[in-house]
Image (spheres, helix red, strand yellow):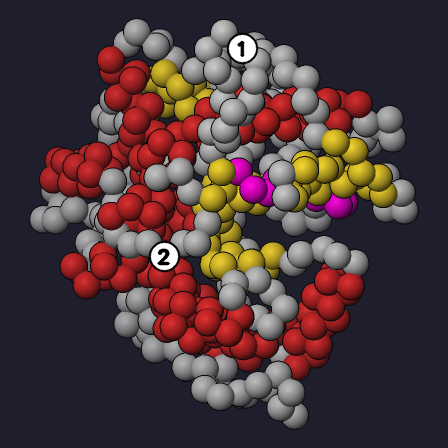
C-alpha cells in the first residue's frame, strides 16, 4: 500500500453530467459510497427542488466528517493527493447542483476533523498521531478547500453566481484572570490554535498565525525535531489560499475561561503546543445533554466582534448553534426557547450601534446575515442531541421559523428587540 503522503487517488473524469446513464467508475469519491452514485444525485436533486419550491434556500456542505473508506485506506486527509480528489468531487457537485444551489460550504469544522480524528482519535477515522496528525490533515484540508474555491471561481461562478466558504467552529475565550498577562497571552494562543488556525490563512495572509508557528517551532526544537512539526505552505500556496472565502461561516456553541498551562511534557501534542488550559466557569448554566456545553450567549456576540475586527468585517453566516438536553426532552421546551431568545438577543446587540446617550440604532456593527440552529430533529450522529429551529435574517426583517416537536406546526415571529444586558457591553 502506498504511504499516507504519497498515495495516488483515481482522478474524477471530466465532462460527466448527472443526466448520463451510468456513474463514472473512475470517480474515486463517488465510487466509494452510494450517496454520490446516480441514485444519490437524483435524491439530492429532489431535495433541492422541494426546498426551492417551498421558498427555502439550500446551503450545501460538501464534507461533514464522512470520508469514504476507499479514500481513508489510501491515507485520507493525511495524503497530499486528496486535494485533487476533493477538487474533482467539488466540481462534480457544482456541475450537478450549482444551477440551483448558490451557497456552498466545502468542509465542516476542519478543526474537529483534524484534532479529534487524527490527533486524539476519538472520532472517525480514529487515528492517534499527537502533535503531527492534526497539523498535517489541517494543512491538506486548507489546500483542498482553496483548490475547490478556485475551481468554482474559474469554472462556475460567472454562470451560477454562487458563494463558497468553509465552516469554522470556535469557542469564545477570555482570560481566567483578566489582570494576569500570562492568562491574556494564553487566551490569544487559544484563539490562534482554534479559529485563527484556519481563518488566518483563508481570510488574511495565506499562512498560519505567527503565534502558532512560533509556539510549534519552539516546542518542536525542545522535543528534538530538526524542523517544526507544523507543515509550511509554499509562497505559491499562500497566494492560492489567501482570500478563498466569499463569506465567513461560523459554528459556535460555548465559551471558555483560559489560563496559562506550561508544557512540561516531552511528547508532542496540539494542547501542549498551545500552552493554554480551558476552564469551564461553573457559574454558567449548562446544557443537560452535554457536560461540555456551557450556555454563554454573550460569548457569541464577543466572538462576532472579534471576527469583525480581525477579519475585515466579513459577511457572517452562523451555520451551527444549538442546545442539547438529556432524554426525554419535555414537550413544553422552555429551556430551549429561552436559550434561543437569549442567543438571538446577543446577535441583535452585535448588529446595533448606539449613539452615545441615546438608544437609537444607527448602523450595523457586524455583517451577520443568517443564523442556523441545529436542527429540525434530535441529531442521530455525533456526540450530542440538538434539535428544532431554523432562523434567518431576510432583507433586514429578522424572522424565526419554528417547528413543533411533531414537525407539523410551523410559525414565524419577529426576532426579539428588547435587550437585556446579561454581560457588560464591550
Residue 26 point in image, percent of width and height: 48, 86
Using residue 68 as the reference point, say whether residue 119 is left or right of it: left
Apparent side of residue 179 relative to residue 115 in the rendered image (left or right): left
Count every numbered label the image shows and give the total: 2
Nearer-N-terminus badge (1/2): 2
- Asked if the stretch drawn in magenta spans residue 369, the answer is yes
- Examine the rendering and report whether any part of residue 130 can be seen: no
Question: Is 125 a magenta residue?
Answer: no
Residue 341, relative to residue 123: is it above or below? above
Q: Which image quadrant for residue 345?
A: top right
Q: Position of residue 249 (x, y in %)?
A: 49, 46
Residue 346, percent from left and from top:
58, 24
Residue at the image point whose x is 24% and y is 27% from the top: 263
Q: Are marks 1 and 2 in contact (CB under 8 Å)?
A: no
Is residue 336 found left or right of 124 in the rendered image?
Answer: right
Mark 1 burial class by Cα count in 10 Å: few <14, some 14-19, many 20+: few
- Which of the image's four quarters has the C terminus? top left
Residue ID for mark 1: 358
Q: Residue at x 35, y 9 (%)?
A: 177
Drawn side of residue 374 relative to residue 208, left or right: right
Q: Nearer the viewer, residue 125 or 155?
A: 155
Decide: is 22 above or below 425.
below
| Quadrant the N terminus occupies | bottom left
Range shown magenta: 368-377
Residue that badge 2 annotates: 244
Q: Distance from label 1 to label 2 (Cα)?
A: 40 Å
Amino acid at each position: 500500500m502506498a504511504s499516507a503522503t504519497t498515495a495516488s487517488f483515481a482522478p474524477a473524469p471530466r465532462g460527466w453530467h448527472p443526466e448520463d446513464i451510468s456513474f463514472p467508475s473512475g470517480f474515486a469519491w463517488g465510487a466509494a459510497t452510494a450517496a454520490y452514485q446516480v441514485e444519490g444525485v437524483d435524491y439530492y436533486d429532489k431535495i433541492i427542488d422541494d426546498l426551492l419550491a417551498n421558498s427555502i434556500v439550500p446551503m450545501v456542505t460538501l464534507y461533514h466528517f464522512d470520508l469514504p473508506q476507499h479514500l481513508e485506506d489510501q491515507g485520507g486527509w493525511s495524503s497530499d493527493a486528496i486535494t485533487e480528489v476533493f477538487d474533482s468531487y467539488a466540481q462534480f457537485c457544482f456541475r450537478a447542483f450549482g444551477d440551483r444551489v448558490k451557497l456552498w460550504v466545502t468542509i465542516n469544522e476542519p478543526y474537529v476533523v483534524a484534532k479529534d480524528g487524527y490527533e486524539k482519535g476519538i472520532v472517525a477515522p480514529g487515528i492517534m498521531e499527537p502533535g503531527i496528525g492534526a497539523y498535517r490533515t489541517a494543512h491538506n484540508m486548507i489546500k483542498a478547500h482553496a483548490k475547490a474555491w478556485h475551481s468554482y471561481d474559474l469554472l462556475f461562478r460567472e454562470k451560477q453566481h454562487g458563494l463558497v466558504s468553509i465552516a469554522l467552529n470556535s469557542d469564545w475565550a477570555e482570560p481566567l484572570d483578566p489582570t494576569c498577562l500570562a492568562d491574556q497571552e494564553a487566551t490569544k494562543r487559544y484563539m490562534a490554535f482554534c479559529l485563527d488556525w484556519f481563518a488566518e490563512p483563508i481570510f488574511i495572509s495565506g499562512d498560519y498565525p505567527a503565534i502558532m508557528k512560533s509556539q510549534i517551532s519552539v516546542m518542536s526544537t525542545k522535543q528534538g525535531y530538526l524542523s517544526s512539526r507544523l507543515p509550511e505552505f509554499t509562497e505559491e500556496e499562500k497566494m492560492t489560499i489567501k482570500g478563498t472565502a466569499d463569506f465567513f461561516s461560523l459554528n459556535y456553541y460555548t465559551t471558555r475561561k483560559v489560563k496559562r498551562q506550561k508544557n512540561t511534557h516531552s511528547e508532542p501534542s496540539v494542547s501542549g503546543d498551545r500552552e493554554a488550559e480551558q476552564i469551564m466557569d461553573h457559574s454558567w448554566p449548562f446544557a443537560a445533554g452535554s457536560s461540555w456545553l456551557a450556555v454563554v450567549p454573550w460569548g457569541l456576540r464577543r466572538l462576532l466582534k472579534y471576527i469583525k475586527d480581525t477579519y475585515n468585517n466579513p459577511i457572517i453566516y452562523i451555520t451551527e448553534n444549538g442546545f442539547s438536553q438529556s432524554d426525554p426532552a419535555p414537550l413544553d421546551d422552555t429551556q430551549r426557547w429561552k436559550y434561543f431568545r437569549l442567543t438571538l438577543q446577543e446577535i441583535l446587540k452585535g448588529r446595533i450601534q448606539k449613539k452615545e446617550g441615546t438608544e437609537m440604532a444607527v448602523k450595523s456593527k457586524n455583517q451577520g446575515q443568517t443564523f442556523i440552529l441545529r436542527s429540525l430533529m434530535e441529531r442521530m450522529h455525533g456526540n450530542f442531541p440538538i434539535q428544532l429551529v431554523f432562523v434567518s435574517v431576510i432583507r433586514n426583517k429578522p424572522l424565526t421559523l419554528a417547528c413543533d416537536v411533531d414537525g407539523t406546526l410551523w410559525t414565524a415571529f419577529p426576532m426579539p428587540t428588547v435587550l437585556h444586558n446579561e454581560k457588560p457591553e464591550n
